[in-house]
Amino acid sequence: MHIHVLGCSGGIGPGLRTTALLIDGQVLIDAGTGVGDLDLPAMRAVGDVFLTHSHLDHVCGLALMADNLFECEAKPLRVHATDATFATLREHVFNWKVWPDFTRLPDAEHALLQFLPLPAGESRGAGGLTLTPFEVCHTVPAVGYAVDDGETVFAFTGDTCADDRLWAALNALRRLDHLMIEVAFPNSEAELGRLSRHFTPAVLGRELRRLKHRPTLHLTHAKPGMEAEIERECRTALEGWTYRHLRTGDIIGA
Ligand SMILES: [Zn+2]
Ligand SMILES: [Zn+2]
């Protein structure tokens, strides 16, 4: 499994891109601003997009990517998400006002975007991988994904905070080699983290004790300008763990 981190930041700025992971060149998890670095052939090679939730930093690239692909008459793009996420996208993004409804273009039968509901707990194959969403705690309905290639297992939590369901889902995996997990705010912003349903280093360090596996951790979604403080605090909070802070363009070789 070759995971190209197209974006992993909690915001934009020079060199910063929001969440998008390209797996084996064919499967995207989330479509934040990171997809803007894909050239057209790379974009056309993507067959499936799995969304964690409806927040703009995770879906804005899908709208723009659809427009690119439509221009070059690409094959349909299969999009997988929960019913709740699709309902929000239909109502607020692909509504002809914010953006054209590419699930009905060029016509409903040959639509560029195929919305394929995928409830948490159900598995779906794509590009030789099996992806299984699991529910997490955020301000809107959200899932993470376990990705299994038959050998190794990679999991991405998406945006989340302390929650029993997260650890139950991860502990139930047959193995867990790499865990990409968010830590968006420093400890000084604990209240904001609690309200916006994101991890801080202290909460993450405490919660990780509930994990039965011992994966390599890949930390993501730091808010711009807060990276140094978060990294400093993680040195204490994540002592004993093998981890790194992801950057745009990193590769996770699972
Ligand atoms: Zn979010
Ligand atoms: Zn986010």
Image (cartoon, rainbow, N blue to C red):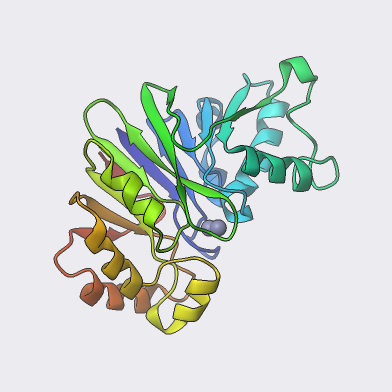
At 70% from the left and 46% from the top, the residue drawn is 88
Identity of the residue furthest to the right in this view: 97
Q: Could you tell whether 113 is left or right of 184 in the image?
A: right
Single out the residue that lies furthest toward the top: 109
Q: Position of residue 126 (x, y in %)?
A: 44, 24
Q: Residue at x 80, y 37 (%)?
A: 100
* In this picture, residue 103 sits left or right of residue 222: right
What x and y, as percent, mark residue 91?
Answer: 78, 44
Residue 75 visible (yes or no): yes
The residue drawn where x is 52% and y is 55% is 18
Q: Is residue 180 above or below residue 208?
A: above
Q: Which residue lies at the image location 56% right of the left edge and 26% below the top edge?
A: 44
Query: Does residue 251 appear in this view?
Result: no
Picture quarter with the N terminus: top left
Q: Quadrant of residue 218?
A: bottom left
The answer to whether 206 is drawn above or below residue 124 in the figure is below
Looking at the image, the residue that sits furthest to the bottom is 188
Residue 162: x and y in percent read 40, 63
Provide residue 89's location: percent of width, then percent of height: 70, 43
* Residue 233 sits in quarter: bottom left
Task: State ligand 1's quadrant.
Answer: bottom right
For residue 68, side relative to residue 146 (left or right) = right
Q: Is residue 240 above or below residue 55?
A: below
Picture quarter with the C terminus: top left
Q: How many discs mark residues in the rendered view?
A: 0
